[in-house]
Amino acid sequence: MFLQLSLRRRILLLIASLAIINIAGSAITLWYAYKTQNLNHSMVNQDLASLIAAQNLETALVMQKGFLTYYFMTDSPEWLEKLKKHHENFQIGLIHAREINPSSQGHKILNEIESRYIRFVFDRENVLTLYKNGEKKEIASKHWNVRNQFFRIHELTGQFKKIQEEQIADSSQSLRDLSRNIKYIAGLAIPCVIILSIFLTLILFSHVLNPIHRLAMEADLKEIPGGLENEIEALKSRVKHLIMDIGQTHAKLEQSQEHLVQSERLAMVGKLAAGVAHSVRNPLTSVKMRLFTLERSLQLTAEQKEDLDVISEEIRHIDTILRNFLEYARPPKLNCQLHSPSDVVDLTIQLLKHRIESYQVDVVVERKEKLPTVMLDSDQLKEVLVNLIINSCEAMGENGKITIIEEKIQNDPFHHTAVIRVKDNGPGISPELKEKIFQPFFSSKEEGSGLGLSIAKRIVEEHGGELRAESDDGPGATFTIIMPIKEYENGDNPDC
């Protein structure tokens, strides 16, 4: 039945059995110590004290007989004084013996001793009076009576002393019996503990330690210090690596699924975009050419010229939306070369110089040193920066300030990232919009296509990086571009 239990239950049962035996042994030991203490207390404070009291009674009684005999022999009053003193000692000892002896049999003997002693003392005083008066004939008969009373009291004190000796003997026997029982229990518990410990050790070795050792032998331990000397640490490290691999695989799988869904959507949007481009852009081109011809051939009033300018601007806006739509649906393949992101930032600011001045916005670049060269498509990264800077300019209006912060961050000894932060002092991004700004076709501007940030995010992610939007409770928003810095043996990587 034990072998049919699960491994967990078998180990728990053995551990519980060992714990119960140890707890029971500790409890029995405490009980034995308590019991021994009580028996020792009883022997020392009661039995031994009662025996001493009985011995004192017997001594005081015998001494009285001796002093009385010495008086009869010498007629010296000194012996009567000593007799009186031992008489008082006998009475005090009698009271003390009654106080410390709890047994009914002992009290009964003490009561009889007391009553006989009172009669003995009375008759003894009569004999002393007759002796002092010189009536020797009457002394003889009463003297033998007092003598017999003495021997009877002496016999009773002997019985009382014997009772105390028997109580001490009983207490000693109880201690011996208790010690013998403890020995039997300990003798039985030790083999049980040994057997249970052997069972537990066998189970742990056969079902826990040996399998762990085999797993450690099968694990790849080349990077683990100490090899197989510490199987638990080896397996811990191995499992940790497996968990990390599983997490990375799961993340990549989710990313692949997202890319697959996105690719399916883009494929459908691409087909739609091709049709839209063919059906809309060609007529738009014709309209633009006719408007240009009309503007050059006709004499237009100021109001008519303003109307034509509005029409041209709206046509340009429609053309921009179509171009972004086509770019989002059919993203160009990256053409990566070794460039420093700092050079792309400088080129972007130079290209947008006149437009930035039109918004009356100041652009400040904060960098300690140029970012290291990485594999990137400079044209597409420039498109990302253009989009972010133009968005900041439009959000701030006139007299704003854009701060571009460049950093090289070391994540660990083997991984570095290039970070570009585009920070403005505009109104910021509300929490409800923060989760939507990267969604396709979502725009907070009336004339926006809603594809600029989506395209920027996709470009950064295709470089293996990340685009984040941050906005505190106060004014201003920060868009952060994070790109990995990799080392390449051949100097280039067309796939980034």
Image (cartoon, grey):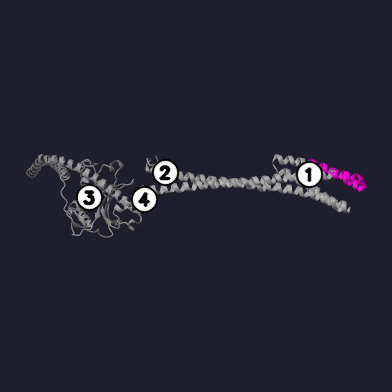
- The percent position of residue 197, horizontal first and vertical second, equals 43, 48
What residue sits 23% from the left and 58% below the top?
Answer: 487
Q: Label 1 belongs to which residue?
A: 153
Q: Nearer the viewer, residue 220 or 71?
A: 71
Horizontally, residue 461 falls left or right of residue 19, namely left
Of the two numbered discs 3 and 1 on the same chain, state the one appearing first in sequence: 1
> Callout 4: helix, strand or loop?
helix
Amino acid type assigned to the residue bearing label 1 in the image: Ile
> Real-space Cα distance between discs 1 and 4?
80 Å
> Real-space Cα distance between discs 3 and 4?
50 Å
Q: Nearer the viewer, mark 3 or mark 2?
A: 2
- The percent position of residue 162, horizontal first and vertical second, equals 71, 45
Picture disc at residue 460: 3
Q: Label 4 belongs to which residue?
A: 209
> Real-space Cα distance between discs 3 and 2?
56 Å
> Real-space Cα distance between discs 2 and 1?
70 Å
